[in-house]
Amino acid sequence: MDSSKLDVLIIGAGPSGCVAAGYLQNQGLNIRVVEKSKFPRFVIGESLLPRCMEHFDEVGLLETLNKQEFEKKRGARFIKGDAVCHFDFADTFTEGWDWTWQVPRDHFDKTLTDALEERGVPISFETEVTHVSFNADGSSETTVLLENGNKEIIKANFIIDSSGHGRVLPRLLHLDAKPRITKQSSIFTHVADKNRPKGIEGTLITFDIVAEDTWLWVIPFSNGMCSIGYVGPTQYLNSFTGSPTERLQEMMQLSSHYYDRFKDCDYNFAPVTLHNIAKSVTQLFGKGYALTGNSAEFLDPVFSSGVTFATESGLRAAKLIAKETSGMTVDWQTEYADYIAKGVNVFGTYVEEWYTGNLQKIFFEGTGNPEIKRQICAVLAGYVWDETNPFVKNHDRLVKTLAKVIDLEGAGTK
């Protein structure tokens, strides 16, 4: 037996890779994490969902996160003109966590990696994967470029690709596929939130819909900063001219609710633009590897599902690897790919129906039924595998049906 060979190489030290590493270390496996960036580093994906709290708790990372006093997120607010729809995570159909966090990811992710390193997990920062070759048995040799310019070959029995938007294995193995949601882009920055209102209003994560397919996110942090960003059709975002700062400043005028709050705030960095933000792959696993988090699939930021899918898939993959390593048989298609696809398909429906206008109609005209609102809230909290919830089990038709009912009821009152 090759004593230098890892049980698992994890590519990427974001939440997905950290949750996977935390679980595998707890199981006594020989692991290593390689990360291209130097932490702390900026990354988007700052709004979490209650579901992922279970993952951090299970792998022993929750306590250290709690100590950071990140801004607590107890729900989500959607605004469209004068209409407001607020979902409270304490009032959901599925039993689970009733709050989570909204976080600056540089601080959040470094907290995770610091905790893992203190536990003895080896994490190699500024280490870029340049090539991967797989053997017939699924084991692999991964070539990495180190900070000092030298190369190293890492042998492992299994690879978890948690590389996020870096998408290492999808890129190297040509696994990219056409995403469900196309032609949406985003532009965003951080600001010192000097005009933040006192009390709850100043802490709320809000999605301000300025057009059916264009919306502003506002995510306040506990450190006094705030993340602001627009999502809209790529062609529309490209119609704004000038520097990135000038473009976002012009777009902020579209929000009657938030323009005054942010009009004289300096941007912490030049706004970043991500074009065609949705991503997908042809397969979630292969012999000797699994794709997790944004490396596998990214839908859209409107319901903040990114980090939750990252930690759900990272933990799921880690559990199956530990199971396989112990000699048990794992059906990766059923236990991993099909399972993850169920959750992605539920959220995918909600994102698609958001942009058709059906879900917006339900939010702003049809949430008078408290039980329906609780069921939808459970989806927005990340509990998209709970098939006792009709809005999970029948997601592909129920949203459309309810929107039609709202239309008929509206027609009947005229």
Image (tube, helix red, strand yellow):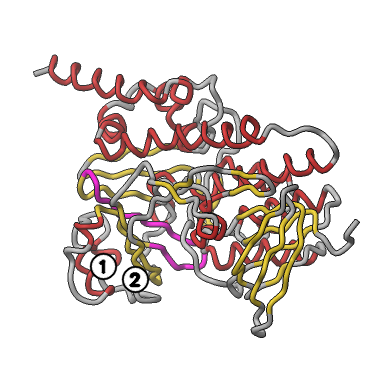
Q: Secondary structure at mark 1?
A: helix
Q: Is residue 215 magenta?
A: yes
Q: Main secondary structure of the magenta part?
A: strand
Q: Which residue is mark 1?
A: 248
| Percent x, y of residue 19 | 68, 52
Residue nearer the viewer, 316 or 51: 316
Are dots 2 and 1 in contact, CB under 8 Å? yes
Q: Which residues are magenta?
A: 212-227
Q: Residues within 10 Å of mark 1 (few under 14, many from 20)?
A: many
Q: Residues within 10 Å of mark 2 (few under 14, many from 20)?
A: many
The residue at 42%/44% (across/down) is 303
Q: Does residue 191 lie above or below 207 as drawn?
A: below
Instruction: Tell whether 117 sits left or right of 18.
Output: right
Instruction: Tell whether 392 sits left or right of 407.
Output: right
**Amino acid at circle 1:** Leu
| Disc on res. 373 | none
For the C terminus, the quadrant is top left
The residue at 53%/53% (across/down) is 295
Q: Does residue 111 lie above or below 95 as drawn?
A: below
Residue nearer the viewer, 67 or 111: 111
| Percent x, y of residue 388 | 54, 19
The residue at 24%/62% (across/down) is 259
